[in-house]
Amino acid sequence: MKAIGDTIVALITGRPPAAVATLRLSGPDAWPIASQVFRPWPEPVEPRRALFGQFVHGDDGIALPFAEGHSYTGEATVELSIHGSLRSVRDLLEACLRAGARHAEPGEFTLRAFLMGRIDLTQAEGVRATVEAATEAQLRAADHLRRGTLRVAIETARNELLRVLAAIEASVDFGEEVGPLDRESVRARVSMVLAGIERLLAQAPAERILRDGLRIALVGRPNAGKSSLFNALLRSDRAIVTAIPGTTRDTVEEWVDLAGVPCLLMDTAGLRPTDDPIESLGVERTRAAIATADARWYVFDGHLGWSAEDEAEWTRLPEPKVLIRNKADLEPNDARGLPMVAIRSEGLGALADWVRTTLGDVEAADGLGIQARHVPLLEAARDALVDLLATLDAPVPDDLIAVHTQRAIQALGEIVGIEVGPDLLDALFAEFCIGK
Ligand SMILES: Nc1nc2c(ncn2[C@@H]2O[C@H](COP(=O)(O)OP(=O)(O)O)[C@@H](O)[C@H]2O)c(=O)[nH]1
Ligand SMILES: [Mg+2]
């Protein structure tokens, strides 16, 4: 864990050279250090008012001071903007270090914001998710997380459990005065909290897909047009397409944004019995891709028609799956499936629609930015509350009910960062970039 009493500095904008670069000083000496590297430095300082002037290393630019309690970190801060040449950035950084600052570590500004109590741990994770967002849906979910939607939900649940715990402890310690525990009231309140946690958990798988992407396996018989469809969706000639069945022998993977969702498309070797050792390895990989994918898109040749092999493969495919009738430009011999002309990129909109509807619930409710770290903690809280409710029906002493309540309070507390150890904080913030 890093010291918090000193003043830190880092470049908070992109890699130089760039048109402009901004450095941030944060800590008790941020203003005195700024006054040594920037002139003229006014006395007294008017916070949040941009100052134009010269830097001691020669460049000119802007200094923007923030007062303690009114900055990103919660500490006294100054943001220094200069021209973004390598030389200018390095010289200003060194001037700040000479004046008493030290280099900020990755995520240290945000860590300070957390330690100063300006944000909770989920909001800190929201900052990182915002910086890393690549799609519109990821950005929306990250915004929610950063603004504290999940924090409020978790803290509200935790506060309710703290009140329940207080009631239980009162009856344990002062049963004579306050009377026996009202178990029906405890049941009603805990059931409400449990329902909220279960809603969050129900949303978690879809949130994972929004965050990590949707893995889609393109499968079907050789020559159905899987590679053509893959290329059409990617808008490039990534996979080899030929009229020779069995051309694709390995799985080829590429990321593509469909309806704002990052999708990992997997083009696979066509499914057929084969004596070719390379092709049969490919077919094995196809089976693996089918098993690990979040969804399967089955392509068949509508001109050729629907074969017994198609029927067998399609039936075996686990849900969720989509049936695609390719080569709709040729005379159809079967009418099932979504019609498509892969070589002309026709009908692909239906696939983007499918992605959209598959994630419809999340899109409608808006992702809250639930992270992988939160899921086991939400599950622990849920399990504790389920145990708690079961205990209410049993002839057990009130202390035991208190134990389960405490377990749930502890798990929820870890989500927002109450009572988390320094190791976890170090691990979490080490994944941030420098300057954040
Ligand atoms: N007419 C027509 N031919 C197609 C279409 N899609 C693919 N093909 C052709 O079908 C053959 C096999 O395509 P390919 O993408 O390699 O199929 P894969 O084995 O399933 O990957 C190639 O000759 C493609 O040009 C389509 O929509 N219409
Ligand atoms: Mg192919």
Image: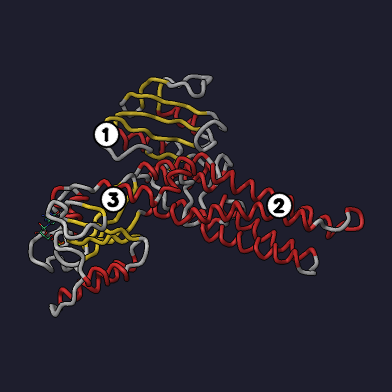
Residue 34 screen position, x and y as percent: 44, 29
Q: Quadrant of the C terminus?
A: top left
Tag 3 or tag 2, which sits nearer the N-term? 2
When the figure is inspected, residue 330 is found, relative to residue 56, above or below; the finding is below
Q: Quadrant of ligand 1?
A: bottom left
Tag 2 or tag 1, which sits nearer the N-term? 1
Q: Amino acid at mark 3?
A: Leu
How far apart in space, not on screen, are marks 2 and 3 (Cα)? Answer: 44 Å
Residue identified by numbered label 2? 189
Residue identified by numbered label 1? 18
Q: Is residue 46 left or right of residue 167?
A: left
How far apart in space, not on screen, are marks 1 and 2 (Cα)? Answer: 56 Å
* Neighbours of disc 3 within 10 Å: few (<14), some (14-19), many (20+): some
Label 3 lies in ligand 1 vicinity (Cβ under 8 Å): no
- SS label for mark 3: helix
Residue identified by numbered label 3? 351
User: Can residue 344 be seen here?
Assistant: yes
